[in-house]
Image (cartoon, rainbow, N blue to C red):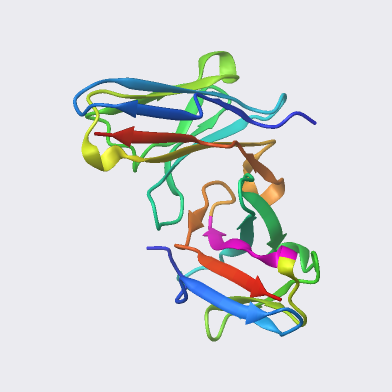
Amino acid sequence: AQRVTQPEKLLSVFKGAPVELKCNYSYSGSPELFWYVQYSRQRLQLLLRHISRESIKGFTADLNKGETSFHLKKPFAQEEDSAMYYCALTDSGYALNFGKGTSLLVTP
Amino acid sequence: EAGVAQSPRYKIIEKRQSVAFWCNPISGHATLYWYQQILGQGPKLLIQFQNNGVVDDSQLPKDRFSAERLKGVDSTLKIQPAKLEDSAVYLCASSLSGFLRTEAFFGQGTRLTVV
């Protein structure tokens, strides 16, 4: 069965500090992984996807199949990065399985 | 482009009552999803439609939940009768064709409180 684990419910960092939001998954095949973000009072939206290998708003995520991880990183956190972040995976290309989310708080 | 529209935004009902949620996806999006998000948890898929056909409803509690997507456009999700544990945010999302190939867009959600 697919499973996505985000071990931190809350992560607090200072502005300008590096940030890493952890995501581990369990799946025997080759899943596709995503990071979704929800800013305060806004809709859940796609931040980045593994297959695109892109950097969005300074965030990157590398898929490590050996460690079954897909951690989200940013070298210098900004206050506007404060939000709820969800890691998600799909094996079929259709339904997404989400983790429980990590609340990121960037303080000045 | 216009986003996914959901109504109502909030609903409070007593247990054992019925409730219905409505979703209007982005025009032209073939795939529509309903997710349930309980406080403190990530969204959980309830049902997925491809046009007006059900692709996956394995996690839908069919004894009390039902959903339909008439004409492959709008969709309604119904709960009858509601239980206290149904209190959650119900999210609708749509995509051109699945999450992998195209981006999915989420609605604002309907927050249901069962008392």
Quarter of the image where the C terminus of chain B is located: top left
Quarter of the image where the N terminus of chain B is located: top right
Numbered range of the magenta stretch: A80-91
- Taking the spot 51% from the left edge, 29% from the top edge, the residue there is B9
Q: Nearer the viewer, residue B36 or A105?
A: A105
- Count of picture labels: 0
Looking at the image, residue B61 sits to the left or right of residue A83; the answer is: left
Looking at the image, residue B79 sits to the left or right of residue A65; the answer is: left
Q: Can residue A86 be found in the magenta stretch?
A: yes
Observer able to see residue B9: yes
Q: Can residue A48 be found in the magenta stretch?
A: no
Across and down, in percent, residue A26 comes to: 44, 72
Q: Is residue A81 above or below residue B103?
A: below
Looking at the image, residue A100 sits to the left or right of residue A78; the answer is: left
Q: Magenta-highlighted stretch: main secondary structure?
A: strand
- Taking the spot 42% from the left edge, 63% from the top edge, the residue there is A2
